[in-house]
Image (cartoon, rainbow, N blue to C red):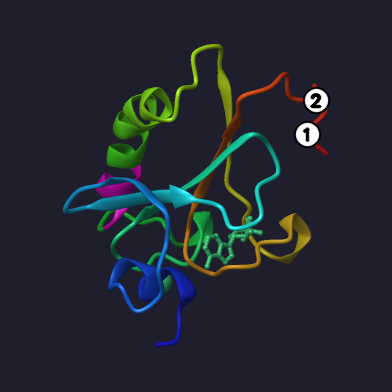
Amino acid sequence: MDCLFCSIVNGEIPSEKVYEDDKILAFKDINPQAPVHILVIPKIHIQSADFITDNNSSYIAYIFEKIPEIAKICGLKNGYRIVSNCGPDACQSVLHIHFHILGGTQLPDKMA
Ligand code: AMP
Ligand code: ZN
């Protein structure tokens, strides 16, 4: 399967990692939309929120357990936004579920 983020997980494509363990990886977005823009991904391939099941939801729960630690590592002290685009209407461009962590500035109050 040809998946950009699976290739980042297995090291075929480099990334600027900020956190990694056996289940998840967090790395800097290549085209940051805020002073801090991190992507958090599971190390297993899940296409999007539409593909979360009983069998893989523990990875998603674990990501949310770790997000506060990742935010702290990235110096986010005054809040941050978590975004996951799902499908064409949301402009999901990489079909491996990922959670954007955006912060380091006052973010706009409108999300769409
Ligand atoms: P989305 O549009 O929600 O699917 O988000 C995909 C994100 O992946 C975008 O913000 C891209 O800038 C980012 N991205 C694409 N390729 C890379 C890469 N090689 N390394 C880091 N981030 C990437
Ligand atoms: Zn993948």
Query: Viewer-proximal residue, 86 or 55?
Result: 86
Residue 13, x across and y down, in percent: 41, 75
In the rendered view, would you say 8 is above or below 97?
below
Q: Secondary structure at mark 2?
A: loop
Residue ID for mark 1: 111
| Extreme-top residue of the structure | 78
Q: Is residue 104 left or right of residue 9?
A: right
Question: What range is drawn magenta here?
Answer: 56-60
User: In front of the other: label 1 or label 2?
Assistant: 2
Q: Inspect the magenta stretch and tell me whether residue 58 lies in it.
A: yes
Give the residue drawn at x 29%, y 65%.
44
Circle 1 crowding by C-alpha within 10 Å: few under 14, some 14–19, many from 20: few
In the rendered view, would you say 89 is above or below 1?
above
Residue ID for mark 2: 108
| Extreme-bottom residue of the structure | 1
Give the residue drawn at x 40%, y 69%.
14
The dot on residue 94 is none
Location of residue 86 by image quarter: bottom right
Give the residue drawn at x 66%, y 55%.
31
Residue 87, x across and y down, in percent: 66, 63
Q: Is residue 109 left or right of residue 3?
A: right
Query: Viewer-proximal residue, 31 or 95?
Result: 31
Q: Secondary structure at mark 1?
A: loop
